Image: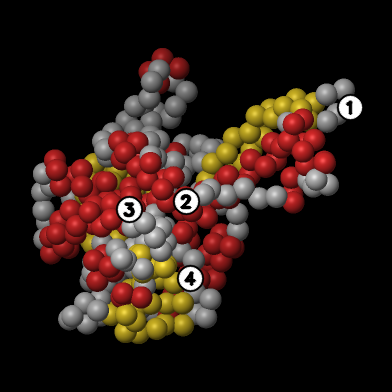
Amino acid sequence: MVIKQHFIPQFLLRNFATDSDSLHLNLFLLKEERIITYAKIRNQAERQYLYGKDQKLESRFSKIEGSVAPLISKLCAEELKLTEEDDSYLKLFIVTQMFRTPTMVSQLNEFANSFKDLFDLDSKFKDTLDEANLCSNDISISITDPYKFFFLDIKEYFFMIKDLHFVLIQAPRTQEFLMGEHPVILLNPYLFEKKYNGSKQALGQKGTVIIMPISPQKAVVLYDKSRYRILKGSQISEDDVNKLNYCQFLKTKDCVYFSNFMDIEKLREFTIKSATFRHGKKLLQESLVEKKNSKGIIIEKLTRKGTIDLPIIQRFNFIRLLENAFLNEIGADISRETLITPPKQK
């Protein structure tokens, strides 16, 4: 029976090891703003019975990890052309990794809890609360067995990213990638440049970019090939590495992991800069339509909900928007409402 259940697989953490036996790595504690060297990998990114004592979900995750671990090991060592099977296993692993962390569960529960506002609009719920001398603010909503909840839809999530194109990027010799407790980063530079005012954190959107570091030197990128160009094996700039490392800070809770010594002042800078976002609400909620009765009380409400975007300028030197990116839309050639030329890259 597996008691310590890891939300980041140990094989992935070992790629950031500091010793030849791949048993230890370095980590930076955000709350204390200090580095711990030679920390045991087996004690990182884990919770007791995180996925349940029945071991069913832990067993499924283990099977996925066993299928993809040799592939990621090869990707770390050399450029590799993926077979169709490799491509599927890698994307299944990435989408699973995206939804198996405490960070994602926290976002899910915040989203679920936001629906308690609707209780005030339903007379049955409102009467029940009134009888108990309660209001909607006195209760909270959360998901029972959230990881099982996610896994039930994992095939749907997988097919949302199945058509994304794979490429590896490489850090320059002077820089390294680090990894947070929620290592899969979701971006959308296309919608950012389009000034889309909804959430840009959804799978299946046009212009989706998914980035996950797999070692201090390399990161996997999945991207919408109809809107971007990313050179295979691109060695990205120091600025881009810093921005991607900062994204890891934005999505982590307690610590980040790394291999070789990193500038502690830079780590502290990222900690302070990311604090407001990390500790704040992650729910984007916008009231679109409200219907009131004769007494001015809201009786119907249409609300748009989503995840708040990362507080960064989504422009990277290694991600190039295609010239026709903003024309590749249904009806764009007729309505001419989209941009004809892409914004200048900065």
Is residue 175 positioned above or below 323 on the image? below
Q: Tell me the tag on residue 254.
A: 4
Distance, label 2 to label 4, CA atoms, is: 23 Å
Is residue 333 positioned above or below 172 on the image? above
Q: Nearer the viewer, mark 1 or mark 3?
A: 3
Distance, label 2 to label 1, CA atoms, is: 41 Å
Q: Residue at x 34, y 81 (%)?
A: 39
Residue of label 3: 56
Distance, label 1 to label 3, CA atoms, is: 53 Å
Among the two numbered marks 3 and 2 on one chain, the one whose residue lies closer to the N terminus: 3
Quarter residue 9 falls in:
bottom left
Q: Name the element at disc 3.
A: helix
Q: Nearer the viewer, mark 2 or mark 1?
A: 2
Residue 346 seen in the current view: no
Q: Nearer the viewer, mark 2 or mark 4?
A: 2
Position in image of residue 184 (x %, y %): 36, 55
Distance, label 3 to label 2, CA atoms, is: 12 Å
Q: Residue at x 41, y 58 (%)?
A: 52
Q: Amino acid under label 4?
A: Asp
Among the two numbered marks 2 and 4 on one chain, the one whose residue lies closer to the N terminus: 2
Residue of label 1: 295
Among the two numbered marks 2 and 1 on one chain, the one whose residue lies closer to the N terminus: 2
Q: Tell me the tag on residue 145.
A: 2
Mark 2, Cα crowd under 10 Å, few <14 / some 14-19 / many 20+, is few
Mark 3, Cα crowd under 10 Å, few <14 / some 14-19 / many 20+, is few
- Between 284 and 92, the residue placed more toward the observer is 92
